[in-house]
Amino acid sequence: CVLWYDGCMLFSLLLSNPIAFLLLAGALVISLTIHEFAHAMVAEKLGDPTPRIQGRISLNPLAHLDPVGTLAILFVGFGWGKPVMFDPYNLKNPRRDSALIALAGPVSNILLALSLSILIHVVSLPELLETVCVITLSTNVGLAIFNLIPVHPLDGGKILVGFAPRELAREW
């Protein structure tokens, strides 16, 4: 999972509006955690115990945040979460199942954004909570779209290689 934000914007937001910075940081932590958790859950459901063994079947953000990647988001504007490791030899159909594992992250972000959108439109929320939901919603949409770009190491590259015809996948 890779995130991109305008690093200058994030750092200046910390200096100019610490509350907005904390809301955005919270949205990033939630988004990254759910994204990586989804990769881990699908890998386990497809037969690989590696994520469970490594403690990745968890909604604890500490299991999913890469210290360097997280700091890089703040200071450089480009960062990442801790990748979910899996062993393709434990999968019944390694090529397809690897693509499904990669697809799980962006799908989880889209589902979270959709859920938040429904919540915002159906329930009358206090202004601060609505703001948190909107920030988290937009963060998840951005994360999903960015990670679906079909280049490695993004999820989109793995999805393309897993579902494309073998000849095209080899060329890609």
Image (cartoon, rainbow, N blue to C red):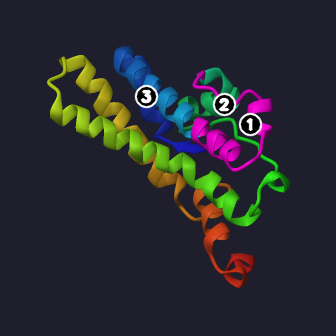
Marker disc for residue 51: 1
On the image, which quarter does residue 91 sit in?
Answer: bottom right
Q: Which residues are magenta?
A: 36-60
The crowding category of the residue bearing disc 1, from other C-alpha atoms within 10 Å (few below 14, some 14 to 19, many at least 20), is many
Q: Amino acid at mark 3?
A: Ala
Q: Residue at x 21, y 32 (%)?
A: 120
Q: Amino acid at mark 2?
A: Ile
- From this viewpoint, which residue is outermost toward the right? 89
Q: CA distance from mark 2 to mark 3?
A: 20 Å
Q: Earlier in the sequence, mark 2 or mark 3?
A: 3
Q: What residue is pinned by disc 3?
A: 27
Determine if the magenta segment contains residue 31. no
- 141 is higher (above) or lower (below) than 23: below
Q: Quadrant of the C terminus?
A: bottom right
The crowding category of the residue bearing disc 3, from other C-alpha atoms within 10 Å (few below 14, some 14 to 19, many at least 20), is many
Q: Earlier in the sequence, mark 1 or mark 3?
A: 3
> In the image, is 79 to the left or to the right of 118?
right
Q: Amino acid at mark 1?
A: Pro
- From this viewpoint, which residue is outermost toward the bottom? 167
Q: Residue 151 in the image: state x and y as whole percent.
A: 62, 63
Q: Residue 162 in the image: state x and y as whole percent.
A: 66, 67
